[in-house]
Every structure is written in structure tokens, then in C-alpha cells.
Image (cartoon, rainbow, N blue to C red):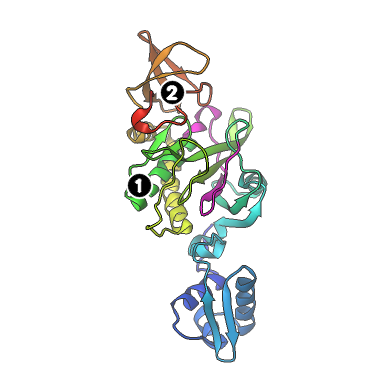
Amino acid sequence: MVNKKPSTKSQILQILRTASSPINGDTLANETGVSRVAVWKAVQSLQLSGYKIDSARNGYQLSEDLADSLYPWEFGMIESSFSHFAETDSTMIQGRIAAEECKNGELKVITADIQNKGQGHADHKWTTTRGSLACTIVSKESISLAESHRFVMACQIAAAKALQETSGRKIFVRWPNDIWTEKGKAGGILDDLSSTGSFTNWINLGLGLNLSVKPKLSGTDFIFDGDKKVLRKDILKKIIENLKAEIKSAKENNSDLEKQWNLFCPDIGKSFKVKDSEKTYLFKGINSYGWAVTECNGQEKSFPPCTINFIKSGEKLNELKI
């Protein structure tokens, strides 16, 4: 559900950001349509959140901003869809709580600046670097378990489109859940779901992106160099906007999602090996369910997501065997 208008905090913040001199409480009350007491409470809440707003007899003035914050009021009309933690264990853990409270078809977003227990696939941890984007997108959707990986595909495509548009760089998707630049892994998606019978109750998508700093791990990269000023909230808005369209496609079970994903993948037509095997496979892309379609000794074989491990870590795209 979307607010009919931005919250009082959101409106006041935008007014103060564009003001060149202090603005008194009466003016803020008139422009936001609330009482002076409501203005005072909103300003106090913003101050407690870290925005430096000076209060004097002649009014309020923003002297130190948190322009790159991910607080819900930074998202304007879609504020009610967001929840933010300055520090938490994991947005995935918080996402499970939020999923139980979501309404059917509703999309919620949990963001955090610091994760103490960031999660990756299997027993891997996700390192949340300074200025990175860490969030969990909560979707209350019922879809066949066999088709649930289509939501991961949708999120990969949504993120790749947004990052490519804003960075001007080529962004790639890799099976089963990675986001890469030409230099290394810059992000990943972790899916978590609840199901009854053969259908999901909800599907959560954990998204981690190295925007301006990469972790101290080989084979990793970040999206934006130091000269390009990009706000996390602007990136996230674009991703969410894209994702809503891609989720619609994911639910329709047509070939559009599969075609888009394969266009973003640099690995099609390349050979690779699987850990603990001497066989060499040809990667032919993915099918509409997100299974890897391969060929070995003239025979085609498909693998469900995360059932095999390609030998690829630590290598740049132009050096990869896959």
C-alpha cells in the first residue's frame, strides 16, 4: 500500500534541504498541513536519527545531512514499504518476521547499514562493506515451489538493469544468483521462503551489493568508482521499480524472464568443470525454471539451482573457464 502523500518527516526534510535560511515552525506547519506540535515531533525524530537540524528562535535549519541514509522517509510516497535498521543481525532474519505480517501481494523492504550476521548461500557469510547496499525484499506471493527460482532471476535482472543504467558499466548475471562486473563478483541474491504443500506462502530475496567498496576477498569488485556520487536510496528505488515489473513476468511463467536472463549472462557457450568431477560441460544458459542447461559428450543435462559448483571463483570474466 502506498501513502497518499509523503510523511511529515519526509516533507520537512525535503523543505529543509532546499532552504537557504532557517524556516519557522508556522511555515513548516502550513506547508505540510500539520500542527506546530507535529512539526516539532517530526524534527525531534529526525535529530535523534542523526540529521543535524539546528533549532533557533528564527526557525529550523539543516546544518548536516544524512543524504545517503536508508530511513523509510527517504523514499517519499513508498515510505510505508520500508523498514530500516542502523545495525541488526541480518535483514534476512528480520525479513522472516515481516513476511508473516505482510498482506497478499504486498512488497516490503528491510534495509540495514550494518549486519552482524550477514547471510550467504549454504554456510557462507556475506560481508557488508561500508556504503554497500544490504536489504531483504519481502514478497507475499503464492507460486509453485518448482517456479520459485524465477523470483531470484527477476531480482538479478532488476538489479542488473538499474546498476547498468546508473553506472554506465556492463553488468552481468551469473548462475545461479550472482551479479558481476567484468572484474569480479559485485553482488548476490539469497532466497528464503515458506511453503505449504507445493506452493509458497512468501518469498524473501536478500540482496547484497558492493556499491563503492569491495570486501577483502579475491574475485570481487564494486560498482561505482570514487568519482561517481551515487545514493543508495536512488539505486534501491530503481531496483524495486524494476523488480515489480519482473515479478509480474515471473508469475506469468512465460519465456520472457529466461530470455532476459540469458542476455545478461556472459557464460553461454563456454566450457566449465564441476567440483569433484573430471567431466567438462558446455553451459547453454538457463531454462524458464532457472535450471542450468548443459551439454556433456553430446548429451544435454539440466541442473537445479545450487546443486553443482562451477570452478570459477577468483577469476575475471575474460579468464573464466565457464
Please state if 12 lies on the left or on the right of 262 as rendered.
right
Percent coordinates x, y for residue 37 in the rendering: 64, 82
Closer-to-camera residue (130/109): 130
Amino acid bearing label 2? Ala
User: Residue 164: which disc?
Assistant: 1
Given residues 119 and 260, the one toward you in this image is 119
The residue that appears at 44% across and 26% down in the rendered structure is: 312
In this rendered view, identify the residue nearer to me: 63 or 226.
Answer: 226
Q: Residue at x 47, y 29 (%)?
A: 313
| Residue 208 spot, x, y in % from top left | 52, 44
Instruction: Find residue 214 and report its horizontal and vertical position in percent.
Output: 48, 45
Q: What is the crowding at mark 2: few (fewer than 14 residues within 10 Å), some, or many (at least 20)?
A: many
Q: Earlier in the sequence, mark 2 or mark 1?
A: 1
Q: What residue did someone put label 2 on?
A: 292
Q: Residue at x 56, y 73 (%)?
A: 8
As for residue 213 lying within the magenta part, the answer is no
Depth-wise, is mark 2 or mark 1 nearer the camera?
Answer: 1
Q: Is residue 258 left or right of residue 190?
A: left
Whether residue 106 appears in this view of the structure is no
Quadrant of the image occupied by residue 296: top left
Please report the residue visible at 50 percent of the width from the left and 60 percent of the height from the top: 78
Magenta residue span: 125-150
Picture coordinates of residue 59, whole percent (x, y): 55, 87
